[in-house]
Amino acid sequence: MSGAPRVAIGLNAVIVAVTDEVPRILTVLPRTGEPGDPAVEALPFGPLDPQHDRTLDRGLRRWVHEQTGLALGYVEQLYTFGDRDRAPRAQRRGLREVSVAYLALVRETSVDDAARWRGWYEFFPWEDWRSGRPGLIDQAIAPALDAWIGGASETLVRQERRERTDIVFGLHGAPWDGERVLERYELLYEAYLVPEAWRDRDDLSGLPEDARPAPPVPRPEPLPGRPMAADHRRILATALGRLRGKLKYRPVIFELLPSAFTLLQAQKVVEALAGVPLHKQNFRRLVETGGLVEGTGKLDSQTGGRPAELFVFRRDVLRERPAPGVGLPHVRR
Amino acid sequence: MSGAPRVAIGLNAVIVAVTDEVPRILTVLPRTGEPGDPAVEALPFGPLDPQHDRTLDRGLRRWVHEQTGLALGYVEQLYTFGDRDRAPRAQRRGLREVSVAYLALVRETSVDDAARWRGWYEFFPWEDWRSGRPGLIDQAIAPALDAWIGGASETLVRQERRERTDIVFGLHGAPWDGERVLERYELLYEAYLVPEAWRDRDDLSGLPEDARPAPPVPRPEPLPGRPMAADHRRILATALGRLRGKLKYRPVIFELLPSAFTLLQAQKVVEALAGVPLHKQNFRRLVETGGLVEGTGKLDSQTGGRPAELFVFRRDVLRERPAPGVGLPHVRR
DNA sequence: CCCATTATGCTCAGTTATAGGATAAGCCCC
DNA sequence: GGGGCTTATCCTATAACTGAGCATAATGGG
């Protein structure tokens, strides 16, 4: 390492939109790839201008607008990532990069060429249960994790690994918890089942390894799911988990919907993010009796069947009820 | 301001314990007070060692232990505070201080002389509803906020202020939401009802003020509630709000309880943090049928009445149910 | 005009939450 | 040793909510 490390602070944005029932996030192609690298996309990233950015989120809005042309509306701080090994390349330059990640919800619009929309589940194919339990889990993930569990020499370690995989992936009778997105990704990372694990290891070769467990031999096949630069897929997982949790107690979907919408549109947005199908009549009952929406009397006849009434979000609900959300059902077994 | 501002990163800890039904947090007396300042306490604060602290929370644990002798158990990242004006004194030295705040839950123990335990509600007297709605709200807060609302010259601004005070303080028929701790503090800050608002303003004199609204004339009496250094009371408010939310869906109280406890002890801890009284029989049913605890068969006869059974936390519950928590009732009107 | 399609209204049973009555098992005091 | 106080524990009545599905309504397309 070259000299005493400095600390740099940056801002990451997970910018979410839902169109055509697909949840999407905005990615960029970082220009700073190393020669010969495959082109891995990254989350939009920008520095904090300590003099002029009055708050962190204003700084974020500023450079997101500069980089992509997007003017962000709803923005919420997500988490601050500061692990020493989170950005091995910066680390080799003697820089400790701490990044404050934000979640932004927008209505999808076209963006500058430098950026593009990507389906969220391209990065986490195992998170989309809208058509039932993804086959990927039983076909690829569970066997690979079994191999990882068996790769531990000590019984106790094997037991811990088994317990953890069961909980986070809902195996052997444990329920599936849609919010544990990050725990699932981190487990796959530790088990060397995502490409980032190997890449980071290579990037760190020569540095002290602390207590990092030995990688499995033979090297397992990486799972489907698009990798990202640095720890950005971890940030993305954090965002999805947080958003899924937030849906239940804050009316955030309306940030993603047009000002007037049908109830099915709203339901599809919730399903897209939660990753589970919902019961139509109950969803309707929930948002209507919960006072979250009010009918406009206008109809949308683009439905293919009976025209649907257009609804608008009732802002007053924030005043009336402490925690209005849409409430997701538990996935039953 | 002296030269181009640099960015410094620090870590703050909100360390919580509950003893004798009083929720407490650990404070320190910063040695860096300006001459003539009244002694304002601060949250424990320490730097990140970019070279040796592998993760942010390890850095936190390191210096918390060095400063106070405490070895932290449960630690969770809270929020990252980076407003330019959050630490006016550092700012005048040309430093942009970004601070990552953590929440730690411990069982109260004695600490080094440099630190001391303070009741949480000393800082937020209006948050403790265990004996009913605090008189402070109607006697002092509501009138002071009324004056602030009336102090706006434009009707629209007055309307917004009215709406906001109603929502966050549960006035004029709006429900009280125990989680809006930060919103309440920030409202009081904006209304110049907490000492920090005036202090920060004085500290910033000479600097550009942007769109900061003019302070009210005449200067209102500050409300009861102990002030803190910099924006630490804001951090504290964030922590209380987050903890109150978390109680509902994660079994965090057990971090604050001894390994064996009676159900009433557990209930009192929840009440202390949530700030509301709970129905005893229902609390018992909730934690018992929720599988959060299991009886040990041993009895505690220190109760003053019939001896209570001692219970322990069932770790297995994390495996069985996605979101086990104790569930707080809504405050009804 | 029949049919496919989507919207919307309604029911029903099972579950969960709120509130409180009733009883149990200690202690203190006389 | 019994009455009264205190806290623990069990249990029930009622209300509210949830998940699931049936039935009907309103379109457009052959």
Image: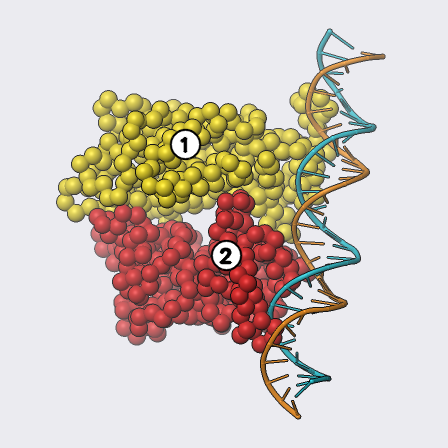
Chain colours: A yellow, B red, C orange, D cyan
Q: SS class of the residue under badge 1?
A: helix
Where is residue B318? Give x, y as percent.
50, 47
Is residue A58 visible from the viewing direction of this image?
no
Three-letter amino acid code of the residue under disc 1: Asp
Q: Residue at x 61, y 60 (%)?
A: B284
- Report the residue at 61% width, 53% height from top: B289
Q: Amino acid at mark 2?
A: Phe
| Residue B91 position within the rendered picture, expressed as x and y whole percent measured from the top left | 30, 57
Secondary structure found at label 2: strand
Q: Would you say B60 lies left or right of B193 here?
A: left
* Number of residues whose C-alpha sits closer than 10 Å to that of mark 2, classed few (under 14), some (14–19) or many (20 or more): many
The residue nearer to you, when weighing D1 against A283, is D1
Front residue (pair B131, B260)? B260
From the viewer's side, name the closer residue of B44 and A103.
Answer: B44
Q: Chain ID for label 2?
A: B
* Mark 1 lies on residue: A146
Rendering quarter of residue A303: top right
Question: Which residue matches tag 2?
Answer: B313
Q: Quadrant of the C terminus of chain A?
A: top right
**Crowd band around label 1 with a 10 angstrom C-alpha radius: few (<14), some (14–19), many (20+):** some
Question: Quadrant of the rendered structure where residue A93 is?
Answer: top left
Which residue lies most toward the left here?
A: A3
| Residue at (44% x, 41% y) in the render | A163
Q: Which residue is painted at 38% across and 57% down in the image?
A: B73
Q: Is there CB contact under 8 Å for labels 1 and 2? A: no
Please tell me which residue lies in front, A233 or A201: A201
Quadrant, the N terminus of chain A: top left
Query: Residue A4 in the image: x percent, y percent?
Result: 16, 47
Residue A179 in sight from this viewpoint: yes
Above or below for D28 versus C29: above
